[in-house]
Image: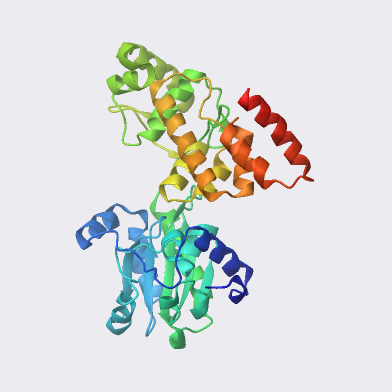
Amino acid sequence: MTELGDATRPVIAESWRRSLAARVDPERHEAPVVYAPDEVADLRDAHPLAATVPLLEHTLSMDETIMIVTDTRGHILWCEGDNRTRHEAERVRLTEGSRWSEDVIGTNAMGTALATGRPVTVHSREHLVRTCHGWTCAASPIHDPHTGLLLGVVDVSGPLKTMHPAVAQLVSAAARLAEHHLRQLAPRRHVLTLDFLGGLRAELDGRPLALTLRNAEVLTALALHPKGLTAEQLALSLYGDRGNPTTVRAELHRLRAQLGDVLMTRPYRLDAVVRGDFLDVRTALRSGNAGKATRHYSGELLPRSDAPVVREERADLAAAVRKGVLERGDLDALLSFADSAEDAEVLERLHGLLPAADPRRALVSSRLRRALD
């Protein structure tokens, strides 16, 4: 059994805890190969970091190492370096198309940088999975310079004996160079922030928007369908079978008065970086991070809305977060979810976990009695 005491640095100990909570087996786990070579090629073409790879490769070209660039879920999209080291890397599946997030392969520089949002170096036995103990890796996140959104990580990995201590600083500097390069390439995009869990708050480039519930429903539908929707599809999403495209077009005309050219037509879509608490929950659930999903889940999606698209997403998010919370049995996660919903099963689990002397237990008991009435 791997002991947390072996992980002396706090960043590594915390990563081990997350990895073990995700049921990563230190003895048996290996990185899964998710994408075939032709699929990797398609992902590369569409990825915003593609334009930075030549710069990163030039900056981080070193003997007996490989340079890796991943997407935000830890999939390796680029792996460059000398053939001998790449051959060695293939033995532990450090190869294009494999996934190196913490939840599937445990503590490693790429996965831990993605989980923490900070540069990290993982040495030898600090890797949770034993097959990686012969490697040292240094990774740094790369963010969109205009929006701050995470785009992926750049990593340099090599056999333990070949990695110089200065590599970590060089990797971090290369990530900043990549961000500077992206800033020069692309004009600034609008940022639309939608916080619709338990309430209705929205901002465009930091400016608060005065939205009606129907406005928020339209934006929810468009945020969930970034490629766009026709007026007919929006009518069905907002009103069901009784929807009228003419009504939707009038609503969109009013919404454009606040959004300007952010709201595009043919099809209707949002030309902006769209952030949102419900989108954060959705992303966390899709990556299997129940803890992160629970932290972002502050209530039901637009609780007063009866629009079909909102009802469906609301039910899906609540059910998935609830399932994750109950399966993990984590006290903090249960308390967080209980604050957002009166759920008898969650309250019963809390009642059993909280010590009798904990003042929160009395509150949970009172709420549980009401939920069971």
* 47 left or right, relative to 1: left
Quadrant where the C terminus lies?
A: top right
Residue 111 rendering spot, x and y as whole percentages: 46, 63
Residue 346 in view here: yes
The structure residue drawn at horizontal position 30% and vertical position 66%, both measured from the top left corner, is: 96
Above or below: residue 282 compared with residue 92: above
The structure residue drawn at horizontal position 35% and vertical position 71%, both measured from the top left corner, is: 94
Residue 261 rendering spot, x and y as whole percentages: 40, 30
The quadrant holding residue 232 is top left
Closer-to-camera residue (136/62): 136
Above or below: residue 360 compared with residue 256: below
Residue 83 rendering spot, x and y as whole percentages: 27, 81
Residue at the extreme bottom of the image, as rendered: 161
Above or below: residue 310 compared with residue 294: above
The structure residue drawn at horizontal position 29% and vertical position 23%, both measured from the top left corner, is: 233
Residue 6 rendering spot, x and y as whole percentages: 59, 76
* 198 left or right, relative to 247: right
